[in-house]
Image (cartoon, rainbow, N blue to C red):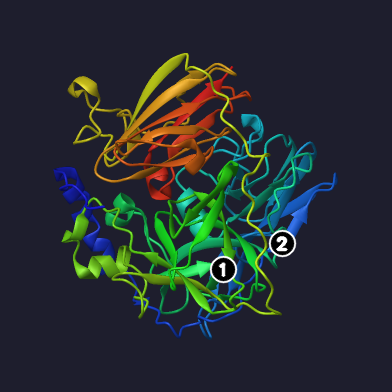
Amino acid sequence: MEAVNMTTSSRRTFLAGLATVAATPMLTRLTHADMAGRALPVPPVMETHGAPITLDAIAGSSTFLPGLSTPTLGFSQPYLGPTLRFRRGALARVNVRNRLNTPITSHWHGLHVPAILDGGPQLQIPPERQWSVEMPIDQPAATLWYHSHVHGRTAEQVYQGLAGMIIVDDPSAPDSGLPANYGVDDLPLIIQDRAFRENGAFHYANRGPARMIGFRGDSILVNGAIRPVAAPPMGLVRLRLLNGSNARTYLLRFSDKRAFHQVASEAGLLPKPVPRTSIQLAPAERAEILVDFSDGKRVTLLSGPDHNNPMGRNMPAMMRQMLGDDPVQFPRGKPGEFEILSFEPHGKPRAAGKIPDSFPGAPRPQFGEPVRTRDLVLNMHADGRGPGMQRGGQPSAGPAGSMGINGRAFSMDRIDIAMNRGETELWTIRAAEMRHPFHVHGTSFQVLHNGGQDVAFDSTGLKDVVLVEGEARILVRCDHTSTPETPYMFHCHILEHEDAGMMGQFTVG
């Protein structure tokens, strides 16, 4: 997507970041030989089975580059966290202990629980303290995730590693017929982009252009390994894709142009498999795809470049490399394409299993007619210097340089929306200058319209993130409560935008 012209305040923000670049330590730009080819790590599983599980937020070090140690954060391991497995109809008991010297949270992204259990910014866990929750699990089977959500620190803490995957199982649903052997033919893939300094440390910036477009690194990690190699069996394999990056949107396809089927999105199974040759994933979006590896051939998963940039192609080459460059070009790909990971199928050849015609257990929309409508404008500048102006030309209340929604930067002390439990609302979300992945806590919604086109439910299913292409309309209903003391959030999931104030709070009574 080509960007519109920069506003005056955008140019000022851009220029303000030049000093940051001049003072930035030298970075390492990885080639295809740097640590690529490592076997795909598979996160261990933590399952409650009725007994409490404990996540420890810890500082550690990880080896991403040859001979270099990278300081990282993680949940119960040096980088990222285990896959949490919850079961519908059961009570998930989780203790989150903060072993760091700074506050954290653990937000259960996509989980339908009361806001007091949601892990948003109002529920900080101080250093050396523990947060214990008992969460009733009552939603369809789905791929979710968890991450820290401290306002002003979310982007940095997730970038350092405070995130992990969640799988919800539904034993009462009809058998989907999909591969379900975790780590074998059911693979979790957490895709992230990172940048490295010459000493092996992560490079991260959250000011100037890096704040405006969201920080993007030039090295791709999958489950914490640089461009690894997976060894799936020769047959149908289920890939659970999670875009865990701060800001980068991926357009994924296979290097041999092989087709695959999308079988699920954020809130669970689609009504029926959707054949595709590529799939787009914005930050925080998830998708489950079914791929046939029965031919035994090595194949690489690629991504196209991310042009979601309000500065367009006017960004200087040095700035692109330091704060927003794409990874090294895949030598046999289309212009700008780069490698995510490779697959080398193994074992005895076997006939591909039958792809189900439909999924009777897939969630269906049950919203009814909306009782009210709301308009939300995502502002790149919520200080009265451009797109952040309120209607009527009144400046917003945010600090200089902040972002916001409806002309107001996020405030922990302000409730922006009051909803009634069980009532359906129609939200229209508008975004200028660039596309924004819009997320609503505590529920799933139906996308009706996006980018000037109606959206067919069967192609997307229920979601909790929508990449707003100019304007999107969604149906929203919440069935759990939230109070002014512990509200739910709605926000852009470009984490630098969220931290800069493009977030709001809502109650459900």
Q: Is residue 252 left or right of residue 7?
A: right
Q: Is residue 318 left or right of residue 273?
A: left
Residue 155 marker: none
Q: Residue type at mark 2?
A: Tyr
Residue 507 figure quarter: top right
Find numbered disc 1 in the image and state the secondary structure of the residue it sits on.
loop
Relative vertical location of residue 225 with respect to residue 237 in this rendering, above or below: below
Residue at the (55%, 28%) spot, across then down: 487
In the rendered image, residue 149, in percent from the top left (x then y), is placed at 53, 45
Q: Is residue 195 left or right of residue 318?
A: right
In the rendered image, residue 391, in percent from the top left (x then y), is placed at 23, 22
Q: Residues within 10 Å of mark 1 (few under 14, many from 20)?
A: many
Disc 1 or 2, which lies upstream in sequence? 2
Q: Residues within 10 Å of mark 2 (few under 14, many from 20)?
A: some
> From this viewpoint, is residue 207 visible?
yes
Residue 224 marker: 1
Inter-mark Cα distance, 1 to 2 = 18 Å
Residue at the (16%, 44%) spot, across then down: 7
In the rendered image, residue 345, in percent from the top left (x then y), is placed at 62, 77
- Report the residue marked by disc 2: 182
Q: Residue type at mark 1?
A: Gly
Relative vertical location of residue 478 with respect to residue 133 in this rendering, above or below: above
The C terminus sits in image quarter: top right
Residue 231 figure quarter: bottom right
> From this viewpoint, is residue 109 visible?
no
* Residue situated in front as seen by the camera: 314 or 352: 352
